[in-house]
Amino acid sequence: MLFEVLSDLIKIDDVLFILKNNAAISEIKSNSLNIRQKEKWITIGDNDGPAHMHINSEFIKSAKFVQEQKSERISFSIRFFDETGDRILAAFFTKMYDESKKLISERKNFFDQLNQKYTSKIQF
């Protein structure tokens, strides 16, 4: 099911995938990405392109849909965790607001539809 969730996410423009640890952060936008799986490894992006990531599907055990209040707006994301609850990957929905800081309903619908499809907390 992890591959299916990630496949749905890369179909949406302006989703920002963030891999983060104590020493480095990598950010990749979903626009025009491809996805494939070979055994336990899920690859997002093109190996020959400017950016891609390899995800060991055996280490991601759960995901959670998050709406987080920020100073002037709400942040929307799906966060993926290992067995100890550490975040492995996050997918942030960007460009959710127009110039007047009004939530764009079409963008919010993408988040809501995925949330309904997979439920708020997913176990892999």
Image (spheres, rainbow, N blue to C red):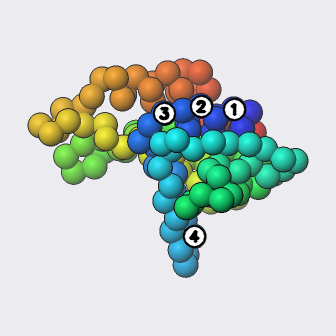
In the rendered image, the vertical position of residue 115 relative to residue 66, given as above or below: above
Asked whether the beta carbons under mark 1 and mark 2 sit within 8 Å of each other, the answer is yes
Residue 64 visible in the current orientation = no
Q: CA distance from mark 4 to mark 2?
A: 25 Å
Q: Label 2 to label 3, Cα distance in Å?
A: 7 Å
Label 1, residues with CA under 10 Å away: few <14, some 14-19, many ≥20: few
Question: Residue 117: x, y in percent?
Answer: 59, 21
From the viewer's perspective, tell me whether residue 36 is left or right of residue 119.
Answer: right
Circle 4 residue: 21
Q: First in sequence, mark 4 or 3: give its number.
A: 3
Of the numbered discs in the image, which one, if any, rests on residue 4? 1
The Cα–Cα distance between marks 1 and 3, rounded to whole angstroms, is: 13 Å
> Which residue is at the front of the view, 69 or 105?
105
**Quarter of the image with the C terminus in it:** top right
| Amino acid type of the residue tagged 3 in the rendering | Ile
Picture residue at 31% right of the left edge, 41% below the top: 95
Locate residue 65 relative to residue 46 in the image: left or right.
left
Mark 2 closeness class: few <14, some 14–19, many ≥20 residues within 10 Å: few
Mark closer to the observer (4, 3): 3
On-image quarter of the N terminus:
top right
Instruction: Provide the residue designation for mark 2.
Output: 8
Residue beneath label 3, please?
12
Callout 1: helix, strand or loop? helix
Give the mark, 4 or 2, whose residue is nearer the N terminus.
2
Circles 4 and 3 in contact, beta carbons < 8 Å = no
Quick one: SS at disc 2?
Answer: helix
User: Which residue is more in the foreground, 40 or 46?
Assistant: 46
Q: Nearer the viewer, mark 4 or mark 1?
A: 1
The reply to whether the C-beta atoms of the residues labelled 1 and 3 are less than 8 Å apart is no
Mark 3: which secondary structure?
loop
